[in-house]
Amino acid sequence: MSAANPATVELRRTLRPWLSNLPPYSKALVGVSGGADSLALAIGLKLEAQNFNVDVIPVVVDHGLQENSDVIAKSVVERLKGLGFAEVFSGRTQVTMLDGLEASARRARYQIFNQALDTYGAGVFFLGHTENDQAESVLLGLARGSGTKSLSGMAQVNGAFIRPLLNLSREVTEEVCAENKIEYWSDPHNLNEDFTRVRVRKNILPLMESEIGPGIIKALARSARILREDSQALDALASEFLVGRLVNDLEISELAALPKAIRSRVLRLAIYSAGAPAGSISAEHLEPIEALVTDWHGQGVTSLPGGVKVTRLSGRLSLS
């Protein structure tokens, strides 16, 4: 693998700060599907990690969702070993369909990822999401109408999981593979327009580039970074408000005194604490709860996902 190529050099420069923060002789994991983004990330990590004495171990997941998926997973493992990775962790998962194929597959995939983290005692797990993925996430968030959090896209750091390529385009990762003569796999699901994300990728973003002008992907990704910073600040204020309070029994007058941007976050935190599934509460769900605080005229109990029930009793917001 040659590093004397512009895309590879750019990739290594992007990864360097993340690797430099890791303890020497530690282990770092990287998810590899066999696509251009994850293979480029694995290549860049292998080239750069040797400067920091970090052992990079790829993780390959067979979701079992396509015919011959096991063959594809094995070919990815062999390709990685051919690139010089001495050890590759692989696992087959059972996808339980609960809330759509994409979400269900993601949940199953992360079970394998967390298993690999436990197996190696690793502190970080690198993921290959790019600037393009971030732009797609922003548009999908806009369609959901869930507010700033949805529009802020994917976090660069979420616990052990790190997405170091959110400022790099998919074109760069494909060029890295070309520079290093690595053939990557194209997942048929990435062409299936039954998935909303694929329609955004193939139809909406190209139309926006054509009608609004080039650079829309970078602009959306940049907006996501700015909105995430704003969202994190507001989240912190909401969490601070709840310190020392019973989240299932909140004083209406105290809630009403909060700016709406903070109050909505307080309400989400309280609802999730009461048992609603993470990420299930939309702006539409919040509207009747907000009305219990600011537009009270005798409304009854409001039911929410996860069996959570919210009502107003004696000047307090009660969640059960």
Image (tube, helix red, strand yellow):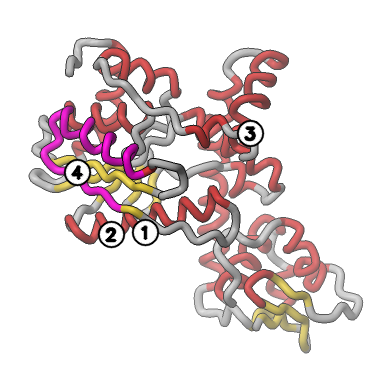
- Residue type at numbered disc 2: Gln
Mark 3 element type: loop
Mark 4 element type: loop
Mark 2 element type: helix
Residue 194 lies in what quarter of the image? top right
Residue at image coords 43%, 28% = 186
Q: Which residue is mark 4?
A: 88
Are circles 2 and 1 on residues that touch, CB within 8 Å?
yes
Is disc 3 surrounded by few (<14), some (14 to 19) or many (20+) residues within 10 Å?
some
Residue at image coords 91%, 76% = 297
Q: Which residue is mark 2?
A: 115
**Alpha carbon separation for disc pair 3 and 4:** 32 Å
Sequence-first tag of 2 and 4: 4
Q: Which residue is mark 1?
A: 111
Sequence-first tag of 3 and 2: 2
Q: Closer to the observer: label 1 or label 3?
A: 3
| Residue 148 drawn above or below residue 225 | below
Residue 15 lies in what quarter of the image? top left
Is disc 1 surrounded by few (<14), some (14 to 19) or many (20+) residues within 10 Å?
some
In screen coordinates, is 157 left or right of 146? left
Sequence-first tag of 1 and 4: 4
Residue 111 at x, y = what percent? 37, 59
Question: What is the span of residues highlighted in magenta in the rendered image?
Answer: 70-91
**Alpha carbon separation for disc pair 2 and 1:** 6 Å
Nearest the viewer among 16 and 256 is 16
**Alpha carbon separation for disc pair 1 and 4:** 17 Å
Q: Which residue is mark 3?
A: 193
Q: Residue furthest bottom?
A: 314
Residue at image coords 51%, 51% = 232
